[in-house]
Amino acid sequence: MTGAGSVLRMSAVDKHFPGVQALTGADLEVLPGEVHVLLGENGAGKSTLMKILCGQYAADAGEVVFDGSVVRPAGPLDAERLGLVMIHQELNLVPGLTVAENIFLGHEPTSGGLIRDRAMAEGARALLRRLRCEIDPDAPVSGLSVAEQQLVEIARALQRRARLLVMDEPSAALSETEIAALFGVIRELVADGVPVIYISHRMPEIFAIGDRVTVMRDGRAVGTRKVGETAAAELIRLMVGRTIADRVLKRDVPVGEVVLEVEGLSGPELPGPVDLSLREGEILGVAGLMGSRRTALARAIFGADSTATGTVTVAGRQLAGHGPAESIAAGLGFLTEDRKQQGLVLRCTVTENISLTSLDEVSRAGVIDLGAEAELARVEVERLQIRVSSLDQELVNLSGGNQQKVVLARWLAARCRVLLFDEPTRGIDVGAKAEIYELIGELVERGVGILLISSEMPELLGLSDRIAVMHEGVLQGILPRAEATQERIMGLALQCEA
């Protein structure tokens, strides 16, 4: 790596965390006027390398040269002053503040020592309009969907006027239209002289937006390629050291009796009413665009929204007016979209997180049997190949992909009859996706019914026996596998088809 003409050169970067060597001699070079894709499996070190660049972590060894000068940001604010701005995969907004307040946090326009609220709102509106969205700048962030919050994060980064912008999975919760708008913004930034480092696991995105791609594996950069001269199969081989089939296929298993029956389900976000059923060994996909309220449907079925009305029946047990505890007791599990806020206890251990829904199984006379609890966790960690230094490791120290696997392990340990999966492969690399698809295949073979919410059309079309399509909280129709095409699904999602 010569570094000639580089905007950024990171050389021989090391980083060690308790029990984990995250980076070992990692290198990265970014050239002027390029979108540089950073690719690798979960835990490969991509986010850690970028957090060192942007001041969140300090490197144990190595050198960072930006615009010809050696830099060592003392923290994220110091990095921002240098022009190094990062949009993190996990959202970092303040729920109690408005959209505009989040976008301008720490950079508020003032006059006479007072914040100019109107100027802040107008500035936020202009930034959001640049992203082709019409989110109200005065709306509280706590009321936004995950996709809307992601757009606010991007607008905040644009406000910082970055000289180099890092985007860590920025499109994970965005629709195809929003991704197209995002790519337009990225091209404008690059044209204005702001190179972009783009972390993504989605192969079509890499080839749509990237100029060059660096692949990381086990804390090292294992190769840099020009995107236009490289095939997807070569990138996957560099990532995982093996060949992975790119087709998503559901295992052919016979469906059994109805295991989930939803009747007349409605609520503030579900004008419905929604009626649907799910059988043993069946995968019912749920499609819809941003604002279709697919997550609201899953939360209502699980009993997470107490205001919902209607009945939910699991394996013959009716759960009218139920809550999460009754759902779990009946054999209903829910893998939430936002694992950080709703799915995990980050300061608890791997063992404690996995056993949360199975405490009765590992307790004697109301006292937890620590040996039984550890054995329960060990079995699931080995089955899902979760990368941990020990079962006592805190979740906050795991990569995003391994955190997601811990959530999956919890519901596997609970032996649920029905699983609600809300974006189960969001932010997960191709290798981990293949493992999760295998796991889903094992579950349906065991007779588990799965309701699968996904924004990835190949995933829905490949895995689902039937696909339910939502639009603004209303179920527009359910298509059998033989009739489910991308065109028909989009027609229902846009209310263009009866």
Image (spheres, rainbow, N blue to C red):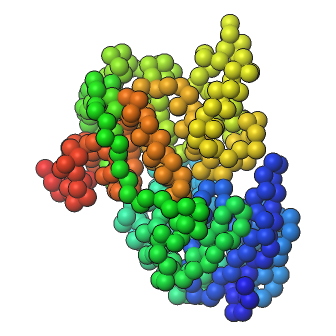
Residue 218 picture location, percent across and down: 70, 61
Q: What residue occupies the far top of the structure in this picture? A: 365
Residue 92 picture location, percent across and down: 63, 55
Q: How many marks?
A: 0
Q: What residue is rendered at 64% in x and 44% in y? A: 386
Splitting the image into 4 quarters, where does residue 215 fall? bottom right
Residue 369 picture location, percent across and down: 72, 17
- Residue 41 visible, this angle: yes
Q: Is residue 17 left or right of residue 404?
A: right
Q: Is residue 359 left or right of residue 207?
A: right
Splitting the image into 4 quarters, where does residue 107 fall? bottom right
The residue nearer to you, when weighing 363 against 261, is 363
Q: What residue is rendered at 58% in x and 41% in y? A: 384
Q: What residue is rendered at 51% in x and 21% in y? A: 325
Q: What residue is rendered at 57% in x and 45% in y? A: 404
The residue nearer to you, when weighing 22 against 328, is 22
The residue nearer to you, when weighing 88 against 417, is 417
For the N terminus, the quadrant is bottom right
- Residue 263 position (above or below residue 204): above
Q: What residue occupies the far front of the structure in this picture? A: 242
- Residue 458 position (above or below residue 142): below
- Residue 248 position (above or below residue 134): above
Residue 190 picture location, percent across and down: 55, 84
- Residue 116 visible, this angle: no
- Residue 23 position (above or below residue 474): below
Q: Is residue 32 left or right of residue 412?
A: right
Q: What residue occupies the far right of the structure in this picture? A: 60
